[in-house]
Image (cartoon, helix red, strand yellow):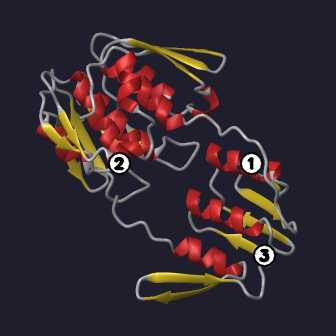
């Protein structure tokens, strides 16, 4: 996905008292003098940097204040988990998080939140095949930026408790404009799956990727299947086609691989997808779940 610098992570850790030296491509981290609470302001609300600060500051002496923190639901879930282990973290879900250091953490029993991107992917599977689907343990408040996109494409959505139902039209409508943004904006991880839907929509869809510089690697693979996509910098313009055709394609990354699976569900003929290791990073037995929904998909 292009450059993914860790300078925010390293700068934040150093402010907490971590000594970091580089040795032939390796980073050696130590804190012989202990960790100390401080005030940290991130130049970008990075999810990974926010999580690293929360984890490191839990047992630091004193209080740590993190400004411009990421606000994703996963940050709130990490706070809840750490507090269940004895930490004192507050403010997750807002732009400022406070961490009061404690001497030590303990174990706990904890249930991780549902994966909102996996939920969006299964909803997309129902949409691209013109079917209907019910996804359980999908929390509406975590999908507020994604569900309107499905509705814009002509899908009917109904939320009941922690389940989301989707009914797709015969042919999807285009997406006028999708801009990926930090939460609560449209998630960058949902960009590739939604682009797969746009390839068979009736009309032109526009995507603007604002999080990662090179998150359009799946475009070339979709083009092998007959998709009509033009990329200029951070902007991708998708002109929907009547049908995609089968091809041998390669999974370029986690969500790009999911997009190719979705495209394969809608394509004529048999699509072969390689490099499944990327998909397996974020989906548990994806082919088995899709098979139970009626897809003709096997792993070889």
Marks 2/1 in contact by CB < 8 Å: the verdict is: no
Instruction: Determine the residue positioned at 34% across, 48% down.
Output: 277
Sooner in the amino-acid sequence: mark 2 or mark 1: 1
Q: Position of residue 123 (x, y in %)?
A: 43, 23
Q: Earlier in the sequence, mark 2 or mark 3?
A: 3
Mark whose residue sits in front, 2 or 3: 2
Q: Quadrant of the N terminus?
A: bottom left
The alpha-carbon separation of the residues under discs 1 and 3 comes to: 22 Å
Q: Which residue is mark 1?
A: 81
Between 150 and 268, the residue placed more toward the observer is 268
**Label 2: how many residues lie within 10 Å, few (<14), some (14-19) or many (20+)?**
some
Return the disc, 1 or 3, that comes first in the chain's sequence.
3
Does residue 219 sit above or below 298 in this rendering?
A: below
- Name the secondary structure under disc 1: helix
Where does the image place residue 249, in percent across and percent down from the top left? Answer: 17, 41
Query: Which mark is drawn over residue 12?
Result: none
Of all residues, the one furthest to the front in this rendering is 300
Circle 3 sits on which residue?
38
For the point 58% across and 68% down, which residue is it? 43
x, y percentage for residue 70?
Answer: 62, 55
The answer to whether the residue labelled 2 contacts the one labelled 3, judged by CB atoms less than 8 Å apart, is no
Q: Give the image quarter of residue 137.
A: top right
* Image disc number at residue 278: 2
């Amino acid at each position: 996905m292009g450059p993914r610098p860790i300078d925010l992570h390293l700068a934040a850790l150093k402010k907490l008292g971590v000594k970091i030296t580089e040795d032939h491509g390796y980073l050696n981290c130590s804190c012989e003098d202990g960790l100390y609470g401080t005030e940290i302001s991130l130049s970008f609300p990075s999810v990974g940097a926010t999580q690293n600060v929360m984890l490191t500051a839990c047992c630091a002496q004193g209080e740590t204040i993190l400004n411009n923190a990421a606000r994703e639901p996963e940050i709130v879930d990490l706070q809840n988990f750490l507090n269940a282990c004895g930490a004192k973290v507050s403010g997750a879900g807002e732009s400022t998080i406070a961490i009061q250091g404690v001497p030590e953490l303990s174990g706990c029993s904890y249930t991780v939140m549902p994966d909102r991107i996996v939920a969006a992917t299964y909803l997309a599977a129902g949409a691209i095949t013109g079917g209907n689907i019910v996804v359980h343990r999908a929390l509406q408040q975590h999908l507020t930026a994604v569900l309107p996109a499905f509705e814009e494409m002509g899908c009917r959505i109904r939320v009941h408790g922690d389940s989301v139902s989707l009914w797709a039209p015969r042919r999807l409508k285009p997406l006028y404009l999708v801009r990926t943004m930090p939460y609560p904006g449209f998630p960058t991880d949902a960009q590739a799956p939604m682009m797969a839907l746009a390839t068979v929509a009736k009309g032109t869809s526009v995507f603007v990727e604002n999080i990662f510089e090179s998150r359009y690697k799946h475009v070339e693979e979709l083009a092998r299947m007959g998709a009509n996509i033009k990329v200029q910098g951070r902007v991708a313009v998708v002109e929907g086609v009547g049908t995609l055709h089968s091809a041998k394609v390669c999974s370029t990354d986690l969500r790009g691989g999911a997009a190719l699976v979705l495209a394969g569900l809608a394509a004529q003929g048999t699509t072969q997808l390689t490099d499944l290791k990327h998909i397996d990073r974020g989906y548990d037995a994806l082919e088995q779940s899709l098979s139970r929904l009626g897809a003709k998909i096997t792993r070889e």
